Amino acid sequence: MTGDTALLNRLKELKEEKNAYILAHNYQIDEVQDAADYVGDSFELSKLAANTEADVIVFCGVHFMAESAKILAPEKTVILPDVMAGCPLADMADPKGVREMKEKHPQAAVACYINTAAAVKAECDVCVTSSNAVKIIDTYPAEEFIFLPDKNLAHFVSTKTNKKIIPWEGYCITHHRVTGEEAKKARESIPDALLMVHPECKPEVVEQADEVLGTGGMIRFARESQQKKFLVGTELGLIYRLKKENPDKEFYLLSAGMLCPNMKLTNLEKMVSSLENLSPSIEVPEDIRVKAKIALDRMLEYS
Ligand code: 13P
């Protein structure tokens, strides 16, 4: 267990006092992952947020994740320990732009990645995460989709389905910065490692991968695989969990630049102070929440 003992004890007390449940994304820092009740990918965390009986959810992740929890569980207090923890990818899509795109493609359904703001989800038909995007696009009753905001995930989905995908021009800074050349060099430097990459990586990186998976998929794959060495093409935080759960295996980050500063903003101290004050709490205007919930409910239904 990492982290300061006094802070961990205080967190435990506060959790009981407030009937709180701590969710942490796989990219969070070590001490946050260790202190959480559940560590998981975007989809697992939304499902848990929708079903928990706690009164308070402490969401250790980024803003759109806490917002999705609030949309699904409006009666609960949802706290984001550092309100500055945003997502540059989510910020690349805006409701007006989505409406304009819908006007250009009136026949298309609109699928949004969970990495979007509530007001964007409110304009969309169905939400997806990296773990269920292909399945949802394949089963949702439409032949054509506007897909936003990640163009790399949109491209990956388009290679796995016969449906028409119209991509939005967004990308995750952390994943998009890795080049095909870097991936090739990394493979050459550890030739006996298996390469797993997140579908937010560029197509030139995805093409070289042995497995293309979301963070939860990587955790499961590494656990079940007979392979001993893995090159991991996603954010640094996942390496901690992979190593912790598979002490007999070796994990190498695909590129040193794969670090999301927003995911590193939360720490034990901020978790304690946010739980003491029940702030910063996430609020979503009710008209937007109701519309955004339709897209999230459909994701849960079609997954
Ligand atoms: P996962 O759903 O795979 O955890 O991905 C979340 C994310 O934001 C990737 O950058």
Image (cartoon, rainbow, N blue to C red):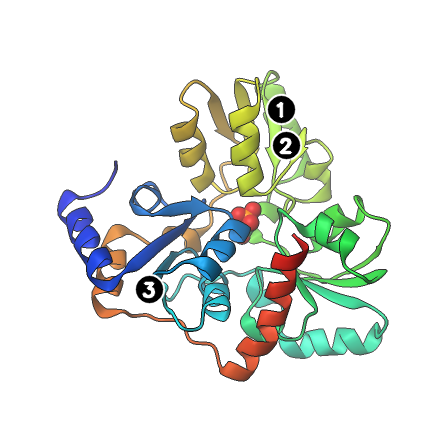
Q: Is residue 239 above or below residue 259?
A: above
The residue carrying mark 1 is 187
Q: Which residue is mark 2?
A: 183
Q: Which of disc 2 and disc 3 is earlier in sequence?
A: 3
Q: Does residue 192 appear left or right of residue 86 in this picture?
A: right
Q: How far is the residue under mark 2 from the one under mark 1? A: 6 Å
Q: Amino acid at mark 3?
A: Val
User: Amino acid type of disc 2?
Assistant: Ala
- Viewer-nearest of discs 3 and 2: 3
Q: Callout 1: helix, strand or loop?
A: helix
Q: Secondary structure at mark 2?
A: helix
Q: Which residue is mark 3?
A: 56
The residue depicted at 61 percent of the width and 53 percent of the height is 129
Position of residue 150 measured from the top left corner of the image (x, y, whole percent): 66, 56
Image location of residue 236, percent across then percent down: 46, 40
Q: Pointers 2 and 1 in contact (CB under 8 A)?
A: yes
Whether residue 187 is visible: yes
Looking at the image, residue 109 sits to the left or right of residue 30; the answer is: right
